[in-house]
Image (cartoon, rainbow, N blue to C red):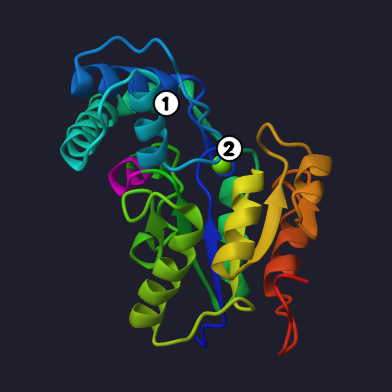
Amino acid sequence: MTVRTLVLWDVDHTLIETRGVGAELFREAFEQATGRKLEHPAEVTGRTEPDIFAKTAELHSIPFNSELLDLYATALTAAYQARTAELAARGRAVPGAAEAIGALARAGGVIQSVLTGNLRAVAEIKLQAFGLADGLDLDAGAFGSDDPVRARLVRIAQCRAAGKYRARFDARTTVLIGDTPSDVDAARDGGARIIAVATGKSTVADLRSAGAGLVLPNLTDTAALVKAVTAVPAEGWDPTG
Ligand SMILES: [Mg+2]
């Protein structure tokens, strides 16, 4: 198989929804790591896990450092491990997600992984809980545990995929699929095409005004998604244009 395209899926509200479990486990891990009650939740949409934790610590006037982040990451991972069955029961895969991953796998020449603000261990638990891990090569992706700045995750994933598949992935041949303006920004700033999907809070209009040229209302039109991924733009295409 000649590998031509690297697809990087966002996780939350693009592939899966925890339906409240994620917020509960965040609270649990925050309180365990800091010894404080969570009183001032930070905005989480589109942000990486380390960024959300640092902002929440700041809102509680708690000095932030890497040791505290490590404590939090350990507590969060343990909380997800302990409540995987509950996550599977209460949350869900976004409608069409499994079919979309399956169709892209059959399209040929497409490697699929994730680009997510989640810690890697948590992303794995979430994807496994909803039966989505099999079609994705997580060794070719990038996570919030790699860098708190989402746009920088694009290069990290491209390098990992290049090393593993001996192919070069650039802004033409890397596609982010995500549900927030932060995903659109990460593609533009990090060097990738974006397919935005209005499966989260952001509407089609929100995602268009964030700069996404291609927006799908959801993941259920598998043929449209495959067509969009495999339509690699011509040499010289400008991702910022
Ligand atoms: Mg998302």
Image height of 63 relative to 167, above or below:
above
- Camera-nearest residue between 224 and 8: 8
Disc 2 marks which amino acid? His
Image height of 183 relative to 80, above or below:
below
Disc 1 marks which amino acid? Gly
Which label is found at residue 22? 1
Residue 236 in which image quadrant: bottom right
Which label is found at residue 231? none
Mark sitting earlier along the chain (1/2) = 2
Within the magenta stretch, is there residue 121? yes
Within the magenta stretch, is there residue 194? no
Disc 2 CB within 8 Å of nearest ligand 1 atom: yes
Q: Residue furthest right?
A: 205
- Camera-nearest residue between 124 and 70: 70
What residue is shown at x 52% (from left), y 88% (from top)?
A: 2
Which portion, as a residue range, is magenta?
A: 119-124
Residue 172 in which image quadrant: bottom right
Left or right position of 59 against 67: right
Disc 1 CB within 8 Å of nearest ligand 1 atom: no
What residue is shown at x 51% (from left), y 59% (from top)?
A: 151
Q: Which residue is mark 2?
A: 13
- The image quadrant where one finds ligand 1 is top right
Left or right position of 47 against 163: right
Residue 39 in the image: state x and y as whole percent. Answer: 39, 10
Image height of 52 relative to 233, above or below:
above
What residue is shown at x 59% (from left), y 43% (from top)?
A: 14
Left or right position of 203 against 112: right
Residue 235 in the image: state x and y as whole percent. Answer: 71, 90
Marks 1 and 2, how far apart at CA? 12 Å
